[in-house]
Amino acid sequence: MTGAAIRRALLFAPLLQYQGRLLLSVAAIALGVALGYAVQLINAIAIGEMARAAQSLSGAADLEVLGPRAGFDEALYPLFAARPEVALASPVVELDLRVRSPGATPQHTLQAAGIDIFRAALLQPAYAAAGAGQASSQAPFDSLDYLRPDRIFLSQSAATLLNAAPGDVVLIQLGLAERQFRIAGLLSGATFRQPLAVLDIAAAQAAAERTGRVNRIDLRLRPGADSVRFINQMAPLLPAGVWIGTPQAGIERAAGLSRSYRVNLNVLALVALFTGGLLVFSTQALAVVRRRAQLALLRVLGVTRGTLLRQALAESVALGALGSALGLGAGYLLASEALARFGADLGAGHFRGLAPEARFEPGSALLFFVLGIAVTAAGSVAAAAEAGRSPPAHALRAGDEQRLFERPGPAWPGMALFALGAALTQAGPIAGLPLPGYAAIALLLVGSILLMPRLTLLLFGALSARISARMPALMLAVRQIAGAPGQTMVSLAASVASVSLMVSMVIMVASFRTSLDRWLEQVLPADLYLRAAGGGETAFLSPADQVRLAALPDAKRVDFMRSQRLLLSPGRQPVLLIARDLDQAGAGAVVPLQSQLKRPEGAAPPAWITEGIADVYGWRPGQTVSVPLAGRNIAFFVAGVWRDYVRQQGAILIERKEYVRLTGDALANDAAFWLAPGGDRARLRRAIRAIPGGGTLELAEPGEIRALSLKIFDRTFAVTYALEAAAVVIGLFGLSASFGALVLARRREFGMLRHLGMTRGQIGAMLAAEGAMVAALGLAVGLALGWLISLVLIHVVNRQSFHWSMEVHMPWAELAAFVALMLVLATLTAVASGRRAMGGEAVRAVREDW
């Protein structure tokens, strides 16, 4: 065999020699890539499905005129239709219908479009194709059904949801009554994949009591028309709260509602990949320790420093490619399972009504494949540099590997990163996302890991002087840790990162859950709550219904509420306007006010805004602001700011009497009942059910609403728990691999101790003490760092993402159980890793020095 062949064999031998280390590194990267790719794939599929759903409704429209959910005057339609730039204008009434099949108890909420078929079919031909090929003797298709007020067309998914077919009758709730509609046909399944209902525009207006009002006007411009110029010309002519823009802008607005949630999931998934990168760093650094003499021999045989560096990097790229490839496959399977179990929103409720299927996304796959390789290579850079830096003569000496861990390194890099991370917590969001907050967390993590050797030397250096020689196992363990402070950074890099992130998430979620629970207590002061429908805009309480409910003998007081969505800015999410009956105690009796001002005499009517409105629009108590209502800009005095954990997009609370005066809308959606002295909840429930249409109402007590809300909260954060648990598993693997590699590297040390008379039990006790103390240090740092990161998550990331504040609540019992479990597992890991060190192999290893 030639010298070059010998060098190549020695160079690539580690790939077979350290199979356990390689498999662990590959598994860590695969897990990180799988989680990241799965989350990204689910998000991409959900957004794509939502965009297709919106595109199926607007068809070939170039522009759309949008207004509040309550609609705007349909007189705008002929104004646009008469413009020379407009080739086609199509008015639309958008509704959410409460529908059920006769004999079926559950109601379903369906998105519905009221259209003028003669106009809409020119923009979206699939409307006119409804019912084609579905005619039968029982349900013959008649094109005039598009104009009949009691006919409705369903998408295939809506028909499946209702277990109905063409010719069947469905019941739609109108007010507190139900009206029969016959299914005239099915919409094209290829075009309309979402649950959707289509009916005549006049029937839709009557159903929602919106006669003379529309929600949207779709526009197709003539060839050559300048859309930007047209928008600029028409915008000043629009009533307050009505905007004109492209359909794509509407898709982006809808996607923006879930953007913060999706970004947070992506970041959490990347945490697992980051922790995997730290595990690669640990295993690669310890591999260099174990191969130190071998690498030095290669240098003697003529292998250059650059060749060693390239080989180490090539090995890391190979590991990264293998781990990324496995991760992509696992991520696809994970995404498929998550979509089937939790839906496109992963339990958060942002993409209801969509039923997307997993499909391969080449762009996302390539991104995470490259990212997996990059993280693996980054984790190997320091180890690769060390592979070629050491002088061969020193590295060939027995015991030289421990010299790598003697120098703790300078403290200033870690302190600088820590200080920079702290500074970034004061920065504002970028493009509406808390990117500086995420960067701050990463810098705090890396800075803390770099400071681990200094902290180890400080703590265990002082402790070693206080340990009695009568406890040899403990004394040796302490002095070993103090004598090799760099070892703690290598051993604990992945575990400190995973523990701190897990602790921070546990604190943040516990704080959020506790704050939510207390918030629910504040916003649910009544004895019983009524809702016309959990979803849907054709279910409401008429003035006559309200009078009947207020007159029930067991009710001391009944407050009614009406809500509608307003578009304050075309580039932002719609906000919710809440008009509620308020007694003399004012808004503070029904919402948790964070700040409040007394309205001056003669000022505009009061309005109370949520923290989201204050953050996004910059409104502050004491200001007079304009709210688009009934086609006009109405002045309101901002009387206070309140906390709201339900409406992320923001809400404005006003007095209902002002709302009725300004809009003439006396309908209500919800009601809150306070029992009269001697009143009975059960009797009040029966009385409500007994009024005409009372059987369609949803009734719930405060305890029931709280329990359901907390159940939804726990389901939403189930994915978060899973992602963080994955990071902790990677951290434990890293600790196990680190101890195993270090124990094998110290075989001569243990063999000498056996020659000097130490028993296997004493060596095992020493390793157990060493593992427990190193793990305790890692857990202590992880707890402290996790607490700091939780403050960033609560006060920076959460506030900038979702625009709500919360108090910090420490889950002491959960943290204590977590720390105890991790400490036990780390100690057992150290003992298990040291079994080989306590055998005869360690004794024989001493002969290598003779």
Image (cartoon, rainbow, N blue to C red):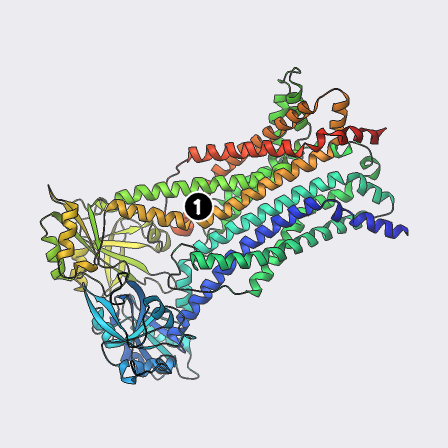
Q: How many marks?
A: 1
Identify whether 631 is placed above or below 728: below
Q: Is residue 447 toward the left or the right of residue 803 in the image?
A: right
Identify whether 37 is placed above or below 407: below
Q: Is residue 86 visible?
A: no
Q: Is residue 289 visible?
A: yes
Foreground of the two, 364 or 799: 364
Mark 1: few/some/many CA within 10 Å (<14, 14-19, 20+):
many
Say what secondary structure mark 1 lies in: helix
Instruction: Give residue 538's position: percent from left, percent from top.
Output: 23, 66
The outermost residue toward the front is: 137
Instruction: Give residue 108's position: percent from left, percent from top.
Output: 30, 63
Foreground of the two, 1 or 562: 1
Q: Which residue is mark 1?
A: 796
User: Which residue corresponds to the image point at 30% horizontal and 68% vertical from the top-left?
Assistant: 67
Instruction: Give residue 220's position: percent from left, percent from top.
Output: 38, 80
User: Which residue corresponds to the image point at 84% horizontal and 36% vertical from the top-left?
Assistant: 393
User: Which residue corresponds to the image point at 21% horizontal and 57% vertical from the top-left?
Assistant: 697
Tell me where residue 187 sits by quadrant: bottom left
Q: Is residue 374 toward the left or the right of residue 120 in the image?
A: right
Identify whether 85 is placed above or below 348: below
Q: Is residue 109 toward the left or the right of residue 529 in the image?
A: right
Tell me where residue 115 sits by quadrant: bottom left
Tell me where residue 141 sits by quadrant: bottom left
Identify whether 514 is placed above or below 548: above
Amino acid type, mark 1: Val
Instruction: Give residue 811's position: percent from left, percent from top.
Output: 41, 36
- The quadrant in which the C terminus is found is top right
Foreground of the two, 446 or 191: 191
